[in-house]
Image (tube, rainbow, N blue to C red):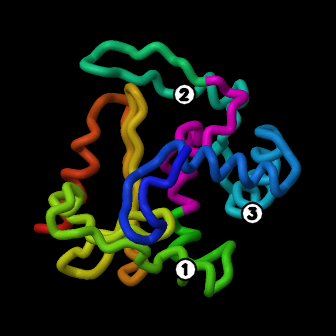
Amino acid sequence: MFLKFEPGSSFEYSGEGYQYLAKVLAHILKTDDAGLETIYQKRIARPLKLNVTKYLQDGKNMENKAKGYIEGIAVKEDDDPAIFGAAFSVHSEALDFSKWLIALLDEEGLTKESYRQLFETQVELPEDHLQRQEGITDWTLGFAKATLPFGSAYGHGGNNPGYSSLFAISPDMKWGYVIFTNANQSKLPLTLLQYLMNP
């Protein structure tokens, strides 16, 4: 891996960067993938009552997982339930995931200073950036920031083969939403965000 630009000077999503961060955490905490899941469950999932949101999958999660589709054809599952994939392996469902969004809105689990830093702009996107067409103006430490007619919203999405998702929250307005799909409908979540931008 290499740094593509000076941190804080630009933005580009990097799944490898999230994976590297997980490895750094594992090194600092002197643990492995199973240990990271145990720590995540202890520090985040259980306090927030996230009952099914996991990185390492168990039998119940795999049994209840929706099958993904691309162009109406089921995708071959290639998840390794034993890998802590910080960029790709979190499995959840909308109700459970919404508990985390509510915790973000209520500023639970972190200090006030940590929340300030979490939502603070790190990079302002240039006017010609492609994400500007989707309404994203800035990136914080983990969220895209969209500037809407009624204030700012923060969110993040994901696309794995056969699945797409997006969540957005507005701390000022105290609202949010989460969409999980099991098909290649990556435009649906963005269409909803654009509708909110131009009601």
- Eyeballing the image, is 188 above or below 102? above
Q: In the current view of this chain or complex, which residue is farthest to the right?
A: 30
The C terminus - image quarter? bottom left
The x, y position of residue 24, in whole percent, is 72, 52
The x, y position of residue 85, in whole percent, is 62, 38
Q: Amino acid at mark 3?
A: Pro
Residue ID for mark 1 = 117
Magenta segment, prevailing SS (helix, strand or loop): loop
Q: Amino acid at mark 1?
A: Gln
On residue 181, the disc is none
Q: Earlier in the sequence, mark 3 or mark 1?
A: 3
Residue drawn where x is 82% and y is 57% of the image: 28
Q: Earlier in the sequence, mark 1 or mark 2?
A: 2
Residue drawn where x is 53% and y is 39% of the image: 88
Question: Dot 3: few (<14), some (14–19), or many (≥20) neighbours within 10 Å?
Answer: few
Bounds of the magenta span? Answer: 80-100
Asked whether, in this view, residue 25 is left or right of residue 101, the answer is right
- In magenta stretch: residue 99: yes
- Eyeballing the image, is 136 above or below 151? above
Asked whether, in this view, residue 146 is left or right of residue 182, the answer is left
In this rendering, the label closer to the viewer, 3 or 1? 1
Residue ID for mark 2 = 65
Question: Dot 2: few (<14), some (14–19), or many (≥20) neighbours within 10 Å?
Answer: few
Residue drawn where x is 46% and y is 48% of the image: 14
**Secondary element at image label 2:** loop
Question: Dot 1: few (<14), some (14–19), or many (≥20) neighbours within 10 Å?
Answer: few
